[in-house]
Image (cartoon, rainbow, N blue to C red):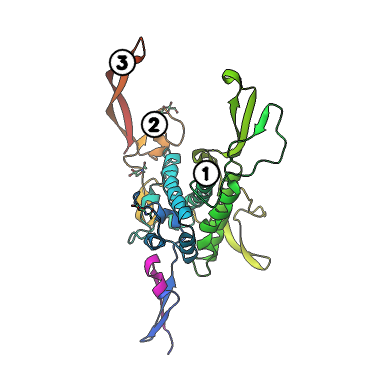
C-alpha cells in the first residue's frame, strides 16, 4: 500500500506512552503519531497544589509532565522531588516579579501545559522561552543547594570549606550552600527531557540545553562570600565566613539583562553536525554566557492567542517612568485611561513611653493609569 497522505497527530504528554512512534496504515492514509514530549516539566510542576507532599513512590505518578528519567529520579529520591516542586513554584513567582514592568509579564507560565488549542509563547523557541529555561535550571539547582544547607535533604549537607586561607580576622565556618550538589542533581532533572531521543526538534533541544547551562552559570556567578560578625558587643573583631548563594531574585535580574541582549540563532551544519550559530553575519560560535533563541517574539502589544500574547490592554503603566513600564512603551502608543485609587496608610504615628507606637489611618487618593 502506498501512502498518499501523511497526517501528523500530536499527542500530549499523558497518552504519549501508548502511542509513541506507532504508525498506522489504513485506507491509503498513513498516520504518524508524533511524539510530543513536554520539555517544560517546571511549568507543569508549578501548577501542582501546594498541599501535595511527595512522601511515597506512588506520588510520583501524580506529577504532571515528567519524562521517564525524571519520574525515576522521583522514585529514588522523594525528598529531592519535593525540593524541585518547591523550585518550580519559585520560578513562577520570580519570573512574574522580574517581568512585572514589561509588556510580556510571564503570565504565560500560568497556562497549564495541556491547555487545549492554546499554543503559548513558551512552546516556541523565543527569547521568553530562553529566559524561562535559564531561570528554571538556575532555580532548581539553587533550591537544591540551599536545601542541603538547611538539612531538608538527607543525601547532602553543607558545601565544602573553601581551600584558600582566609584573610586575618576572617575564618571559615558556618554552613555554605552546596552548589556542587545542586548543579549535579539539578542538571540531571532539568536536562532530562532534552536528552531524550524522541523529543521535539533537535534545534529546540540544543536551544534549551544551552540556555539551561547559561542559567546554571549565572548561579555559579552568584556564589559569594557571606560573613557574620563576632567579638565583644558586635565589635566584629573576628568574622565567620562561608560561601552562600545570592537570592534567586538577584539571579533572575542578571538573567533578565541577558534576556534583553539575547542572540538570535539558526540551526546550521557546522563541521559534521548541526549546531546553533548566531544568525547575524559575524561568524562566531555562540557564547557560553548569552541566551539564544530561534524564533522572534510577538511585540506583546495586542492580544494574540496564537502567538501567546496577552496584550497590554488594562495593564497598569507609569506616567513618570521612562522605562519599559512607561505608559508610552507599555501601551504601545494606544494611550491610557486614568483612574483614582484610594490608598489607606498609617500616619500621625506617636511613640509612647515605653514601648509602643500608635498610628492613625489616613486616606489618600492617587492617580493611576491603565492602557487603552
Ligand atoms: C505524607 O504526607 C502527608 C501529607 O500530605 C501526611 O499526612 C502523611 O502522614 C505523610 N506520610 C508519611 C509516611 O510521612
Ligand atoms: C499580566 O498581563 C496580563 C494581560 O494584561 C494580565 O491579565 C495579568 O494579570 C498580568 N499578570 C501578572 C502576574 O501581573
Ligand atoms: C513610577 O516611576 C517613577 C520613576 O521611575 C517611580 O519613582 C515611581 O515610584 C513609579 N510609580 C509607581 C506607582 O510605580
Q: Counting residues from the N terminus, which is met first, the one under dot 2 or under dot 1?
A: 1
Task: Label 1, secondary structure: give it.
Answer: helix
Q: Inspect this view and state whether residue 290 appears.
A: no
Quarter residue 16 falls in: bottom left
- Other-residue count near label 3 (Cα within 10 Å), few / some / many at <14 / 14–19 / ≥20: few
CA–CA distance in space, label 3 to label 1 = 39 Å
Q: Nearer the viewer, residue 214 or 291?
A: 214
In the orientation shown, which residue stands out farthest toward the top?
A: 353
Which residue carries the number 2 mark? Answer: 318
Rendering coords of residue 112 (x, y %): 36, 56
Which residue carries the number 3 mark? Answer: 358
Label 2 beta carbon less than 8 Å to ligand 3: yes
Which image quadrant: the N terminus?
bottom left
Rendering coords of residue 164 (x, y %): 72, 38
CA–CA distance in space, label 2 to label 3 = 33 Å
Task: Label 3, secondary structure: give it.
Answer: strand
Q: Nearer the viewer, residue 266 or 234?
A: 234
Rendering coords of residue 280 (x, y %): 61, 53
CB under 8 Å between discs 2 and 1: no
CA–CA distance in space, label 2 to label 1 = 36 Å
- Judge from the rendering whether residue 314 lies leftward or rightward of residue 325; answer left or right: left
Q: Nearer the viewer, residue 322 or 167?
A: 167
Quarter residue 349 falls in: top left
- Judge from the rendering whether residue 47 lies leftward or rightward of residue 218; answer left or right: left
In the orientation shown, which residue stands out farthest toward the bottom?
A: 1
Which residue carries the number 1 mark? Answer: 146
Look at discs 2 and 3 and give the one toward the viewer: 3
Part of the protein shown in magenta: 4-18
Task: Label 2, secondary structure: give it.
Answer: loop
Q: Counting residues from the N terminus, which is met first, the one under dot 3 or under dot 1?
A: 1
Residue 17 sits inside the magenta stretch: yes
Quarter residue 270 falls in: bottom right
Amino acid at each position: 500500500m502506498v501512502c498518499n497522505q501523511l497526517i501528523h497527530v500530536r499527542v500530549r504528554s499523558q497518552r504519549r506512552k501508548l502511542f509513541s512512534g506507532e504508525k498506522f496504515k489504513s485506507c491509503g492514509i498513513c498516520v504518524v503519531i508524533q511524539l510530543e514530549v513536554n520539555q517544560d516539566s517546571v511549568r507543569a510542576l508549578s501548577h501542582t497544589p501546594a498541599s501535595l507532599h511527595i512522601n511515597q513512590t506512588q506520588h510520583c505518578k501524580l506529577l504532571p509532565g515528567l519524562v521517564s528519567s525524571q519520574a525515576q529520579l522521583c522514585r529514588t529520591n522523594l525528598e529531592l522531588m519535593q525540593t524541585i516542586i518547591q523550585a518550580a513554584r519559585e520560578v513562577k513567582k520570580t519570573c512574574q516579579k522580574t517581568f512585572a514592568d514589561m509588556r510580556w509579564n510571564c503570565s504565560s507560565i500560568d497556562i497549564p501545559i495541556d491547555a487545549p488549542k492554546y499554543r503559548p509563547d513558551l512552546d516556541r523557541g523565543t527569547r521568553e522561552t530562553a529566559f524561562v529555561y535559564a531561570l528554571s535550571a538556575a532555580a532548581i539547582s539553587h533550591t537544591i543547594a540551599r536545601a542541603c544547607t538547611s538539612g531538608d535533604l538527607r543525601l547532602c549537607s553543607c558545601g565544602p570549606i573553601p581551600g584558600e586561607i582566609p584573610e586575618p580576622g576572617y575564618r571559615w565556618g558556618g554552613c555554605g550552600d552546596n552548589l556542587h550538589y545542586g548543579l549535579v542533581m539539578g542538571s540531571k532533572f532539568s536536562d532530562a527531557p532534552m536528552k531524550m531521543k524522541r523529543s521535539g526538534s533537535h534545534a529546540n533541544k540544543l536551544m534549551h540545553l544551552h540556555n539551561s547551562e547559561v542559567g546554571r552559570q549565572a548561579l555559579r556567578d552568584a556564589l559569594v562570600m557571606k560573613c557574620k560578625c563576632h567579638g565583644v558587643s558586635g565589635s566584629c573583631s573576628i568574622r565567620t565566613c562561608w560561601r552562600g548563594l545570592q537570592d534567586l531574585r538577584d539571579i533572575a535580574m542578571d538573567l533578565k539583562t541577558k534576556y534583553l541582549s539575547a542572540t538570535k540563532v539558526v540551526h546550521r551544519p557546522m563541521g559534521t553536525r548541526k549546531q546553533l550559530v548566531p544568525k547575524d553575519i559575524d561568524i562566531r560560535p555562540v557564547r557560553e554566557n548569552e541566551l539564544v533563541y530561534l524564533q522572534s517574539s510577538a511585540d506583546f502589544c495586542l492580544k494574540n492567542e496564537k502567538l501567546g500574547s496577552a496584550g497590554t490592554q488594562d495593564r497598569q503603566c507609569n506616567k513618570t517612568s521612562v522605562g519599559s513600564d512607561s505608559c508610552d512603551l507599555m501601551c504601545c502608543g494606544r494611550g491610557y485611561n486614568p483612574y483614582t485609587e484610594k490608598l489607606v496608610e498609617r500616619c500621625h504615628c506617636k511613640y509612647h513611653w515605653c514601648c509602643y507606637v500608635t498610628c492613625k489611618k489616613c486616606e489618600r487618593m492617587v492617580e493611576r493609569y491603565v492602557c487603552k
